[in-house]
Amino acid sequence: MKKLFRPLKTRYDAPPPLEGADYSPATPLVLYVEDEADDAFFMRNAFRRARLNLPLRVIEDGEKALAYMQGKPPFDCRLDDPVPSLVLLDLNLPLRSGFEVLEWIRQQRRLDNLPVL
């Protein structure tokens, strides 16, 4: 039987707090954290068919999601990679689970109002 979730790492392994980022981006962005290419394709298609004029940024794993949220390279230019207005988060991700990403987001005071689905 395949394990769906890996155990969470200890708090000592948690990434550092968010610094210098603002939760009110000039252009709303949806961050979609999904490791399955087919799911990402269908989400992009759904956005197009619904005529949502929101940029959709797809990140493939939990480590990259944390780097994006923290503004670390290669996501260190907030003009190109703004803090998202909404995060669509898969829970079963490689490298770090969606639960770990969610836990980090919820520990950041500046992201208190960031919706995560």
Image (cartoon, rainbow, N blue to C red):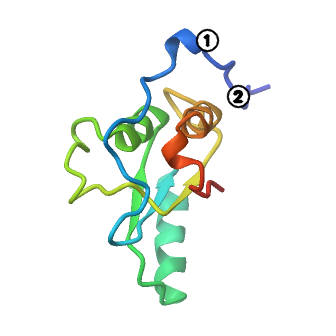
Q: Amino acid at mark 2?
A: Phe
Instruction: Please name the residue shown 53% across and 28% down the image.
Output: 96
- Image side of residue 78 versus residue 66, left or right: left
Q: Earlier in the sequence, mark 1 or mark 2?
A: 2
Q: Nearer the viewer, residue 31 or 104?
A: 104
Report x, y in % for residue 111.
Answer: 52, 48
- Image quadrant holding the C terminus, namely bottom right
Q: Amino acid at mark 1?
A: Thr
Label 2 crowd bin: few (<14), some (14–19), many (20+), radius 10 Å: some
Label 2: which secondary element: loop
- Image side of residue 117 versus residue 22, left or right: right
Q: Is residue 87 above or below residue 107?
A: below
Q: Nearer the viewer, residue 85 or 5?
A: 85
Residue 10's disc is 1
Q: Is residue 52 above or below residue 62?
A: below
Label 1 crowd bin: few (<14), some (14–19), many (20+), radius 10 Å: few
- Image side of residue 5 versus residue 53, left or right: right
Instruction: Please name the residue shown 54% across and 88% down the image.
Output: 50
Q: Is residue 61 above or below residue 50?
A: above
The image quadrant that residue 83 belongs to is bottom left
Residue 5's disc is 2
- Image quadrant holding the N terminus, namely top right
Q: CA distance from mark 1 to mark 2?
A: 15 Å
